[in-house]
Image (cartoon, rainbow, N blue to C red):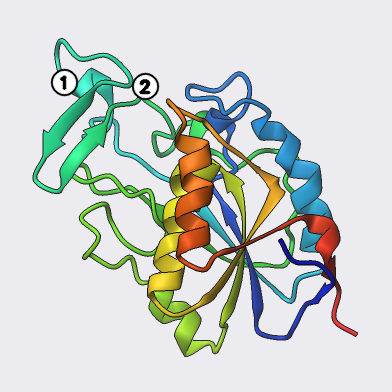
Amino acid sequence: MSDNIELQADDVLLVIDVQNDFCPGGALPVAGGDEVVPVINRLARMFPHMILTQDWHPKDHISFASSHPGKEPHDVIETEYGPQVLWPDHCVRGTPGADLHPELQVPACELIHRDAYRAKMESYSAFFENDHTTPTGLGGYLRERGLTRLFLVGLATDFCVQYSALDGRKLGFDVFVIEDACRGIDLEGSLEQAWANMASAGVVRIRAADLRAPA
């Protein structure tokens, strides 16, 4: 844990998948998912740069249990890129479930980065598809703009937040995860394992109160 971190001109608040389907009442709700919204709204007033990600599946996506007859959500299948957990249909592009949470207030957002739009490949990370080699282009965008410290918030801690944090570190960025602005799914201990994975990679775990606006 760290505290008293003063934000800098090259800091980015990366808001991961705060969408209706991941909040209570949605197709794949994360417990307490909507509780991150007011925390993120407060943080948004502090950060010089903000980027949002948005899960953006086609209706026949490979990660949907409905695309595999006889399979149920949380079953695991083998794909060309490795094991894939199956999920209920969620965040189908153009549907209300894929919309950003209506109370999210980030007027200074500079980019909405859409993920998982390839029908035959899942994408948990904002930086790479789930084959771990196909880049999404976000890393290049950040580098070209000289933005080097990433502060991650959103849903879910043990999936898209974790994978984005790990890949951010792999690409050489300084990465912080603001834990009280995230919520996890926690499938069979996945949340505890995610925090351990991130710590091992050098991701710094903080809370919103640890941050100070630029002087």
Rendered residue at 21%/42% (across/down): 119
Residue furthest left as drawn = 80
| Residue contact at pointers 1 and 2, CB within 8 angstroms | no
**Quadrant housing the C terminus:** bottom right
N-terminal-most mark, 1 or 2: 1
Tag 1: amino acid? His
Q: Which of the 4 image quadrants contains residue 74?
A: top left
Taking the spot 46% from the left edge, 42% from the top edge, the residue there is 193
Looking at the image, is 203 positioned above or below residue 86?
A: below
Which residue is under mark 1? 68
Left or right: residue 124 compared with residue 204: left
Residue 77 percent across, percent down from the top left: 16, 29
Residue 25: percent from left, percent from top: 60, 18
Residue 126 against residue 32 in the figure, above or below: below
Q: Nearer the viewer, residue 1 or 186?
A: 1
Q: Give how far apart the Cα atoms at labels 1 and 2 are.
A: 11 Å
Task: Using residue 89 as the reference point, say whether residue 41 is left or right of it.
Answer: right
Residue under label 2: 88
Q: Position of residue 50 (x, y in %)?
A: 65, 67
Query: At label 2, which amino acid type do we have?
Result: Pro
- Within 10 Å of disc 1 (Cα), the crowding (few <14, some 14-19, many 20+) is some
Residue shown at 45% from the left, 35% from the top: 190
User: Element at badge 2?
Assistant: loop
Check the image and name the residue furthest to the right: 215
> Which image quadrant: the N terminus?
bottom right
Asked whether the viewer can see residue 136, the reply is yes
Q: Is residue 87 left or right of residue 157?
A: left
**Secondary element at tag 1:** loop
Q: Residue furthest top?
A: 70
Task: State the image coordinates of residue 40 (x, y, percent, origin top left).
Answer: 75, 51
Residue appearing at x 65%, y 38% in the figure: 101
The answer to whether residue 61 is visible is no
